[in-house]
Amino acid sequence: MKNALQLLTGLLVVGDVSLVFAESSVHSPAVGTESLKTGGQNIEKLPDIEVAESVEKAATFSGSTAVIDKQTLERDQVFTVNEALRKAPGVFVRDEEGFGIRPNIGIRGQNPFRSTKVLFLEDGLPFNFAPYGDNDIYYHPPIERYDGIEIYKGADLTQFGPQTLSGAVNYLTPKVPTKPGGFASFTGGNRDYLNGHVRYGGMFNDIPGVDSTGGTIDYIHKEGDGARDNTFAKLDDVNLKSIVDINAKHRLTLRGDFYQEDSQSTFGLTEAEYRSFGSRYNPFKNDRFTTNRWAASATHEYSFNTDATLETSFYWSGFHRDWWRQENQQPTDVVGCGTAFRSARMNGEAVNVDTDCPWVRGRLRDYETWGVAPTLHAKHDLFGVESQLDAGFRAHMETQYRRTEEGTSGTARSGTRSEFQERFAEAYSGFVQNKFIWRNWTATPGVRVESVGYERLNKLNGARGGSSVTEPLPSFAMTYSPIDEATLFFGVHRGFAPQRVEDTIGADGNSVEIDAEKSWNFEFGVRGRPLLGVKSELALFHHDFQVLTALGTVGGNDSPVAQGSALFEGVEFFNRVDLGDVFGWNHNPYLQIAYTWLPTAESTSAFRCMLRSNGTPQPESSCPSGNVYGSATGKRLPYAPENLLTATVGYAHPSGFDAHFETVFVDQQFGDFMNLQSGAQHPNGASSVEALSGQYGKVNEYIVVNFATSYKVQKNLTLHVSLKNMLDNDYLVDRVRGMLPGSPRLMQAGIKYEF
């Protein structure tokens, strides 16, 4: 903590303490036809661009936030959500399959495995298919679908929940244009990449009894090869939004979405395979991941007057997933590919999955989620002090249908059923907070209460069990603006994440003694705009976990589950400089930096293995003396790199030309609690399955350089070219389920026509 405070003090002395993404142009109101000077460019604005909405929250928050706006997403030709989120400080995104459809996102040092520590929202509504009972993310829509991303990391998290441990990501769907219009774009590239995107929408005023109504329709098709052999992906996404302005007091917003994916998705390589065949090798050509998702929501806004609004939202989603995989690298599979096949992989010998591994396991999942959430926003005077009240309630229901089937060939898509379960979560939550505004100060006390009930039914043996948890989550935030150009902020809140259904109720129906995750989170920082064309933010954070659940790093797998205590401390820094605005130039050289320093990410206790789902202890081979291998006080936690940096330098010409380079640096990180340099150091010996599996050891630091350029040929026509990983660096990103590489060089070019 001392080092972090020294760095914070030093940066404050240097000056240039200016930011928040949240003050970026994504929050600019619609304007009439005019020429606006932005970043040294004269940009012609069309009249009445978009209908104002209330889904953007970051600009109203007291704590640390970041906004990645529409202009940034388009300018950088962002290929995946991973590329987008790396532009925000404090966010660590780990690649997996190369297409960004199963992102691994961690905020402020949290393990990014399956994004289990992050809350996902879409226009402020829960986004994931089971945020209470199973927060793993196995689905992510194409990033092109969104017009902005907000990242929340402070005490304001308690407005949402249930995941308040580290941060939330709120995706902003396209606004409805006031006048009919849209665009069509096409992008192609190497590795058989194709991307077609069409959007159209507008508002109309000719419906009797309604002030105005309108909407947008957005369709995206993407396909191409992933980061390795046999990892082709194809997906389609259709998104609908409609706004009905009934009158001055009532507005109704309707949303609908359909997503489908057909991809080849599998696990990683052993140490020997990685050395013998290179990082792109993947023999599992039969592995298949198919999914579809339907979703709908409705939000009614009622304005009592100019100072009070009641928003009531209903949301529903249905998610179906079939994942068929052949070999799981488990040394004790009763049904599997056999020891000879496994030994060949461990020794780096080529295998034939059709003849050497005549077996497949299908993990078949269906989720249904729905909820209702009324929220009141009101300006008022309390004790003679100007105030802003926010209060809300949510009822949320989840159902999981889970089957596992064992097939007798690599291409089988049915087989003997080995698991058949139903899992339920019923959650009720409420929050209230009041922002007091006095001169240059604001103070916002608040509290959230989460109450969750679980149930699990094993349909193979009839066992049924239940469990529940209730937790109050207090918060407090404060800001002080000594000058117009800078704001100091402070926040503290109770971090919380509920247990998964499978962790708190065993397959035998009995309750398992496992705690919800809990922490105390503190942050202090400063943000501002010291000069026209300069914005930045500096934040110090301290997250003290009394209970932290470890997944994806225990025995190299996501089972067994383990819990312990931990401490995370660090500094985030963001700075954006547009020299065109600073010096009044028409040409605009610009620089942007997002940096995270995480000097402390350590265990403050050993991580103890929880009971297995059948209620029995974990085997000694996985958990010696009941603890995770190598887990001890003072050890650095897995997948917590000390330094993260994304730096961009570019140039924008007033004619509509833009070109920039982006450099991404990710520091070294450990893949296990033992902090091994390589699997050869594993206590079970260099010849053991565990040591050779590729799941243990260090992930070395790496650098990726990207380039993007675009040119507006005419008012409605833009051409763009990009190079991702332009130096074609071959680097490792993950070891959780074997060694996985980052994407190779990607060359993409496209055209966008607006109408």
Image (spheres, grey):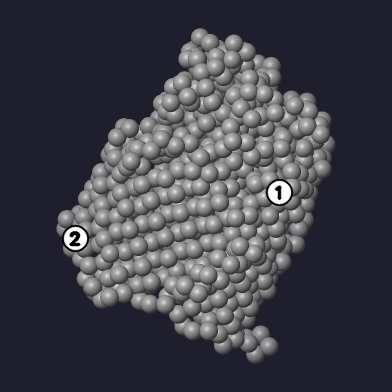
Q: Which residue is mark 1?
A: 634
Q: Nearer the viewer, residue 699 or 337?
A: 699
| Amino acid at dot 1 | Gly
Image coordinates of residue 478 in percent, x first then y, are 62, 76
Q: Which residue lies at the image location 42% right of the left edge and 45% below the top edge?
A: 703
Give the class, few, some or many, for how many residues have Cα within 10 Å of label 2's Cα (few <14, many ≥20): few
Nearer-the-camera pick, 650 or 66: 650
Q: Residue 322, can we see it?
A: no
Question: Which element type, helix, strand or loop, lies under badge 1?
Answer: loop
Q: Is residue 122 left or right of residue 226?
A: right
Query: As drawn, is 139 to the left or to the right of 339?
Result: left
- Viewer-side label of 1, 2: 1
Residue 715 has which mark?
A: 2
The answer to which quarter of the image holds residue 611 is top right
Query: With respect to residue 658, does 29 lie above or below?
Result: below
Residue pushed farthest left? 714
- On the image, the x and y values in percent for residue 531 come to 38, 77
Query: Can residue 550 be seen by looking at this rendering?
Result: yes
Q: Is residue 441 above or below residue 494?
A: below
Q: Is residue 618 above or below residue 379?
A: above
Task: Residue 464: name its quadrant.
Answer: top right
- Indicate the amino acid at tag 2: Lys
Residue located farthest toward the bottom when viewing the structure as drawn: 384
Give percent across and percent down for residue 646: 43, 54
Residue nearest the viewer, comparing 20 with 538: 538
Which quarter of the picture shows residue 697?
top right
The residue drawn where x is 65% and y is 46% is: 636
The residue that appears at 43% across and 65% down in the rendered structure is 575
Q: Quadrant of the N terminus?
A: bottom right
